Structures are given as structure tokens and as C-alpha cells.
Amino acid sequence: MVTNMAGKHLITLQEWTKQEIDTCLDTAYDLKLKMARRIPHASLRDETVFMMFFDESTRTRNSTEAGATQLGAHAHFLDASKMQIQHGDSAKDTAMILSSYGHAIACRHCGWGTGNSYIREMAKYSRVPVLNLQCDLYHPMQGLADLMTIQEHFGRTQTRGLKVSIIWCYATTHKKPISVPLTQALLFPRYGMEVTLAYPEGYELPEWVIEQARVNAEENGGSIRISHDIRQAFEDADVVIPKNWGSWYADSKKETVENREGNTTLTEAELEKLARNKSWKCTQDLMDLTSAHSIYMHALPADRVNEVEDSVIDGPHSIIYQEAENRLHTVKAVMDLTMGGRR
Ligand code: CP
């Protein structure tokens, strides 16, 4: 248990100790119970969190905003495209100014090669905690909710040895960042899980992630293996997390193009690579290979046509709504612990 986390940034869980993560989960369990029992828990009365969004959101925005209200704080929603960023306000300017008005700055910025560095630049100058609501590299709030959900299902102390498969799946909905699988690949081995990372060639995560995940596994009794065989990933798995992610390599090499509206689209080569892997889909047949008590997870939004069959995502193994609900309890825990302190 860590008793003082006030003022702490959350950019990646890799920069939080296990004790800090466990303290956060203790707090999330407590807040979940308080909510269920309608026990008031306004620990952040009169505080303000600024929520800057460069990208769309349902779960992250609403769990943070509702969570702030429940903690007695106020959350300002800031659409980054309506701020003065285009007219010259830098990350430093924004952080210096917003942190003089309130008690936390929470930000989602998934731009490849820019999101994480923008958030880190704000953290450098902010006098209050900067909370990452997803960037090009990390989605710590999703990671916390996923860990809590796995613990709730299998037992808080029973994660060691669980077979967890993070599986790339085909999707056409939108180009998804690597931040969810990257966060899970780093976090789950720290809790002793045996992680399989499965994907078709061309959708690998950066090598430094795998190296760090191996270190995390060695230090905590977990493991990480790579597979290019979707069936192998499902066989005997206790937890399956089939989800699309983009090609970080293509993104980092700028093998994407911008259309007239300024949106990033895939090049012909990237589209062909994607189409070649249409068979990477979570089906009932594949779910039948998993262990009897397995769970299906997805951070959402899911591409129900291409990523997963309805019979799976709406089926008995699916715990997607519990996972989504835990976004509320975990972000409340993060705000409860980190806000209220100034640097
Ligand atoms: N999982 C997740 O972050 O959902 P949103 O994009 O809706 O916030």
C-alpha cells in the first residue's frame, strides 16, 4: 500500500510500481463497493480536472467526467480542435495555464509520434498531475480496468499462470493505435500471467516493448511468447483479447497518406496487407478451443462485422460490459489518489 500518490502523473503504468498499481486497484474496489451501496465518496470536492481530447471517445470521456462528478469534482471537456492550439498555444503554454486553474489535466492524443511526446511535454510543465487518457503508445486507464476485470473473474491473487492471449484481428472501422495491446503486453506479465501475443506478420509491436515485457515477466514469474498462428493463441487460453491494431511500423515510416479532409488513410500497400489477413477473426469455432471457464474481453469499440462474431461478443464468455464499467471505478481511483496535490 502506498499512502501518498498525490501529484503523481500517470503516463504509462510501466512508470508506476506494482505497489502503486495495487493501491490504485484497492481504491477502485473500495469505490465500486461504495457506489453499489450508495455511500457518498466526494473526496475531491471543489477540484477541477481538465479533459483534453484530440480524438473521439465514449468510455474514456464519460467515465472520467462521471467519475469526477461522483468524487465531488468538476470535469471540463475540452475539444482540442476548439482550443487555441492551432493558433500557437504550445503543450507548455497549455499545461502552465490549465494547471494554474485546476487540479489535474487529463489528455487523449493518439497522433502517431506526437501523442505521447505532447502529453510528456505537458507533464514537464504542469503543476498538477497529467493523466494519459490514451496516446499513440499507452492506454493506462484501459490497462487498469482490464487488470481489475481479470482479477474480479479469476480472483485477486489468482492471476499467476493465467493464459492470456492478445490477438490481432481484422477490422475496417478505423485505424486503431497500438496502445491497448502494448499496455496489456507490458502489464500482464507483471502479474504473473502467461501472455501470448498473436498477429499476422507486419503487425508486430515495437521490439523495445517485447524486451520490456520479457523483463517484466522474468521479474514477476510471468511469460510472453509471440505466435503467428491464431488457433494456437486460442488453444487452452483462459483470457482472449482479440482486437485490431494498426501497423506501427507503417505509421512510424509514414506509409500512410492524408486525404483531403486531413484524415490519415492507409496506402494501397497497407490496405492489401490488411485484406490478406481477413481470416484473423474471433469466431465461435476458435472460442471452442479455449478453456471451459475462459473470458472474452475487448476494450471497445469493436468491429462486429470483421473482428468478432456476434455469438462471441454477445455470448456467455464475454465480459465486455463489466470491463467497460470498470473504466469508471479505475479512473476514479486514479483521480482520487493523484489529485489534490501540487508540484
Ligand atoms: N476503450 C476506450 O478507450 O474507449 P473510448 O475510445 O470510447 O474511450
Image (cartoon, rainbow, N blue to C red):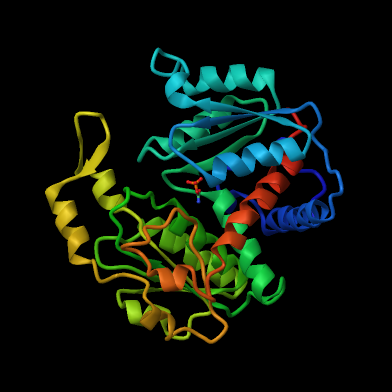
Residue 254, percent from left and from top: 23, 41
Q: Residue 323: in sight, yes or no? A: yes
229 sits to left or right of 342: left
59 sits to left or right of 305: right
Residue 90, percent from left and from top: 46, 19
Q: Quadrant of the C terminus?
A: top right
Residue visible at 18% across and 53% down in the picture: 271
The relative height of residue 260 versus residue 224 in the rendered view (above or below) is above
Asked which quadrant contains residue 200, the reply is bottom left
Q: Looking at the picture, tell me which residue is in the foreground, 154 or 215.
A: 154
Q: Residue 6: in sight, yes or no? A: no
Residue 269, percent from left and from top: 13, 52
Residue visible at 39% across and 53% down in the picture: 178
Asked which quadrant contains residue 288, the reply is bottom left
The relative height of residue 125 versus residue 193 in the rendered view (above or below) is above
Q: Quadrant of the N terminus?
A: bottom right
Residue visible at 27% across and 34% down in the picture: 263
Residue 294, percent from left and from top: 54, 79
Residue visible at 27% across and 45% down in the picture: 251
- Residue at the far top: name it: 87
The relative height of residue 42 versus residue 85 in the rendered view (above or below) is below
Question: How many labels, in total?
Answer: 0
